[in-house]
């Protein structure tokens, strides 16, 4: 009989200690983890960060020129593929550029008209930034 009681006590202690360890090991995620999951990077800020080094030495205020170019490209170019390719070109080179490989073949014929559409705003951003602020 005492063997049964001792084994029952040992078994219950074993089970309780396992449950206690499981409770100690399980920690709910911290609030900062959830917050960092929902932080959306600022695409304009990232664009300006990538673009500005290409503008240094060319313009007195490279960040404002890059910001202006981003705003006009985002507002003027309706097609998402062309807009992304244009923004990529500006951020990588500092000038409006679209590589044909960045655009689906069905939209490559729209590259020229896209440049025509953004030509005047681009020149305003680069040479007359006071009117764009």
Image: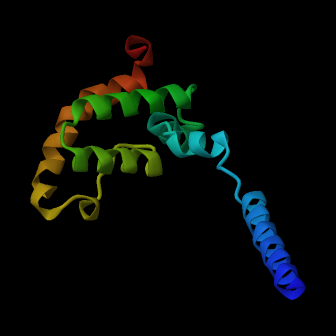
Q: Where residue 99 sits: x, y (%)?
A: 29, 58
Q: What residue is shown at x 24% (from left), y 61% (from top)?
A: 100
Q: Where residue 106 sits: x, y (%)?
A: 10, 60
Residue 123 seen in this snapshot: yes
Front residue of 64/34: it is: 34
Q: What residue is shown at x 41% (from left), y 26% (from top)?
A: 68
* Residue 32 position by quadrant: top right
Please indicate whether residue 110 sits to the left or right of residue 132 in the image: left
Q: Is residue 18 above or below residue 23?
A: below
Please indicate whether residue 79 sits to the left or right of residue 19 in the image: left
**How many marks overall?**
0
Q: What residue is shown at x 22% (from left), y 36% (from top)?
A: 77
Residue situated furthest front in the rendering? 1
Please indicate whether residue 38 sits to the left or right of residue 31 in the image: left
Front residue of 74/128: it is: 74
Q: Where residue 131 sits: x, y (%)?
A: 38, 12
Q: What residue is shown at x 47% (from left), y 41% (from top)?
A: 47
Q: Quadrant of the N terminus?
A: bottom right
Q: Quadrant of the C terminus?
A: top left
Residue 51 seen in this snapshot: no
Q: Is residue 42 above or below residue 6?
A: above
């Amino acid at each position: 009989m005492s063997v049964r009681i001792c084994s029952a006590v040992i078994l219950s202690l074993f089970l309780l200690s396992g449950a206690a360890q499981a409770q100690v090991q399980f920690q709910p995620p911290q609030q900062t983890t959830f917050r960092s999951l929902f932080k959306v990077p600022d695409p304009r800020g990232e664009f300006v960060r990538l673009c500005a080094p290409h503008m240094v030495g060319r313009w007195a205020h490279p960040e404002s020129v890059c910001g202006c170019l981003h705003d006009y490209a985002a507002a003027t170019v309706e097609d998402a593929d062309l807009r992304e390719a244009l923004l990529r070109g500006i951020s990588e080179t500092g000038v409006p550029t679209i590589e044909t490989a960045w655009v689906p073949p069905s939209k490559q014929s729209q590259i020229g008209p896209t440049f025509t559409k953004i030509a005047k705003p681009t020149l305003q951003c680069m040479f007359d930034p006071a009117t764009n602020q």
